[in-house]
Image (tube, grey):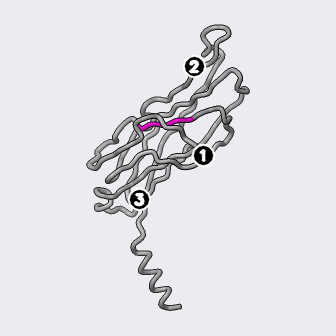
């Protein structure tokens, strides 16, 4: 048993971690006045501001090596609070972030957000204030009047 404990302690020294922060709070109110002509429907989609959410990714605990050369993958999914399946939520990355020495790839085109995690974008080195925009499709006068909400979850993996 003593040998097993020593091995576990040695392996725990090699475990890496990471930290991700996202700030937002977007909501969209649809009113009858948003319908321009009688017999028409709501617009095909609504979009948030281009800088709606800011995402920052870094190694944790702080590591200069990982902040410069670490490989990070950011995943995205949503967890419905009260959601209609006819609504389609999409995201896209609208900036490379600020003060970035590394590189960032992917996420520049709209991608649908599902209930299971999917690749969003990849970073080499830490990323700070990467801007994200949202879009919702499927709004309709046929959709029951209610307050629909979902939580968008970002997960980071460091390889």
- Furthest residue to the left? 101
Element class at badge 2? loop
Marks 1 and 2, Cα distance to the nearest angstrom?
25 Å
For image coordinates 58% across by 43% down, the residue present is: 114
Residue at x 29% of width, y 61% of height: 64
| Between discs 3 and 2, the one toward the N terminus | 2
Q: Main secondary structure of the magenta part?
A: strand
Say which quadrant the C terminus sits in. Answer: bottom left
Q: Which residues are magenta?
A: 89-93
- Element under disc 3: strand
The 10 Å Cα crowd at callout 2, few under 14, some 14 to 19, many 20 or more, is some
Label 3 CA crowd tier, 10 Å (few <14, some 14–19, many 20+): some
Give x and y (percent) for residue 120: 45, 45
Label 1 CA crowd tier, 10 Å (few <14, some 14–19, many 20+) = few
Task: Tell which residue pokes out farthest to the top in this image.
Answer: 38
Please give the name of the residue rendered at 63% of the width and 25% of the height, measured from the top-left corner: 139
The x, y position of residue 129, in whole percent, is 38, 43
Q: Which label was assigned to residue 153?
A: none
90 within the magenta span: yes
Residue 42 placement, left or right of 7: right
Identify residue for label 2. 43
* Residue 17 vertical placement versus 12 (above, below): above
Q: In terms of secondary structure, where does tag 1 sit?
A: loop
> On the rendered structure, is 145 left or right of 17?
right
Q: Which residue is tagged 1? A: 115
Q: Nearest the camera: 89 or 23?
A: 89
Please determine whether, in this image, residue 136 is positioned above or below residue 107: above
Q: 125 and 31: which one is in front? A: 125
Mark 3 or 1 closer to N-term?
1
Residue designated by label 3: 158
């Amino acid at each position: 048993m003593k040998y097993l404990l020593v091995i576990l302690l040695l392996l725990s020294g090699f475990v890496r971690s990471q930290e991700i922060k996202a700030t937002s709070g977007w909501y969209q109110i649809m009113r009858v006045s948003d319908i321009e002509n009688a017999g028409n429907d709501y617009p095909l989609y609504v979009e948030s501001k281009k800088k709606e959410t800011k995402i920052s990714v870094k190694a944790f605990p702080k590591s200069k090596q990982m902040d410069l050369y670490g490989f990070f993958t950011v995943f995205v999914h949503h967890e419905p609070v009260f959601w209609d399946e006819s609504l389609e939520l999409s995201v896209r990355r609208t900036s490379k972030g600020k003060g970035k020495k590394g590189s960032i790839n992917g996420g520049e085109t709209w991608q649908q957000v599902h209930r299971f995690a999917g690749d969003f974008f990849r970073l080499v080195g830490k990323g700070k204030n990467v801007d994200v925009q949202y879009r919702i499709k499927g709004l309709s006068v046929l959709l029951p009047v209610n307050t629909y909400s979902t939580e968008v979850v970002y997960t980071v993996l460091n390889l």
